[in-house]
Image: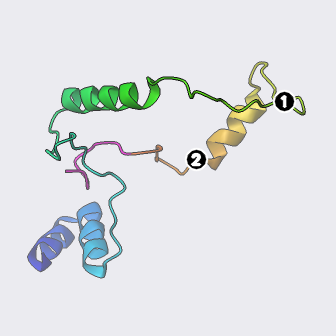
Amino acid sequence: MAERAEEAGRRGDVWTLYEITRRLSGGFQSMCEPLRNEAGVLLRTVEEEMHRWREHFERVLNHDEPPNPPEVEPKDELNIRTGRITRVEIKSAIKKLQNGKAAGCDRGNKGWR
């Protein structure tokens, strides 16, 4: 790994150098876990993953209603705006984003699989 870091430094490949440094320092934690089927076999294609998610949600969401559901009465009306989103709200949301970052895994070649 040291040779890879030296070579990346010579090439000016800052991203690879940074990733190697993070791994060596123990600070690297992948946010993406590989998806496995129910038997524990690693899924390799996006189609396999989508099929597995479909199976998961069908099992979780499609079940009989509970025999004695609790009776819940709403106490207060929630103050939720459902109108159009304003430009100010959009600008505020964009400012809160990290530069060049999207939520979740991008499935690029850096750190995934």
Q: Is residue 19 magenta?
A: no
Name the residue at 17% across, 47% down: 40
Label 1, residues with CA under 10 Å away: few <14, some 14-19, many ≥20: few
Residue at position x 26%, y 73% in the image: 23
Residue placed farthest to the top in the image?
A: 83
Residue most toward the front?
Answer: 67
Q: Position of residue 47 (x, y in %)?
A: 21, 26
Q: Residue furthest left?
A: 3
Amino acid type at mark 2: Leu
User: Where residue 17 appears, x then y in whole percent?
Assistant: 25, 69
Horizontal side, residue 3 vs residue 38: left or right? left
**Where, quadrant-wise, is the N terminus in this rendering?**
bottom left
Q: Position of residue 4 (x, y in %)?
A: 12, 71
Residue holding disc 2: 97
Residue at (28%, 75%) from the top-left corner? 21
Which region shows up in magenta?
Answer: 105-113
Seen in the picture, residue 103 relative to 78 is either above or below; the reply is below
Q: Name the kind of residue labelled 1 in the image.
A: Pro
Q: Is residue 77 left or right of residue 54?
A: right
Task: Find numbered disc 2 in the image and state the secondary structure of the residue it sits on.
Answer: loop
Is 111 within the magenta?
yes
**What element does badge 1 sit on?**
loop
Comes first in the chain, label 1 or label 2:
1
Position of 112 relative to 83 (above/below): below
* Residue 8 higher or lower than 34, as above or below: below
Front-most of residues 58 and 97: 58
Nearer to us in this view, 72 or 30: 72
Q: Residue furthest right?
A: 76
Residue position marked by numbered label 1 in the rendering: 74
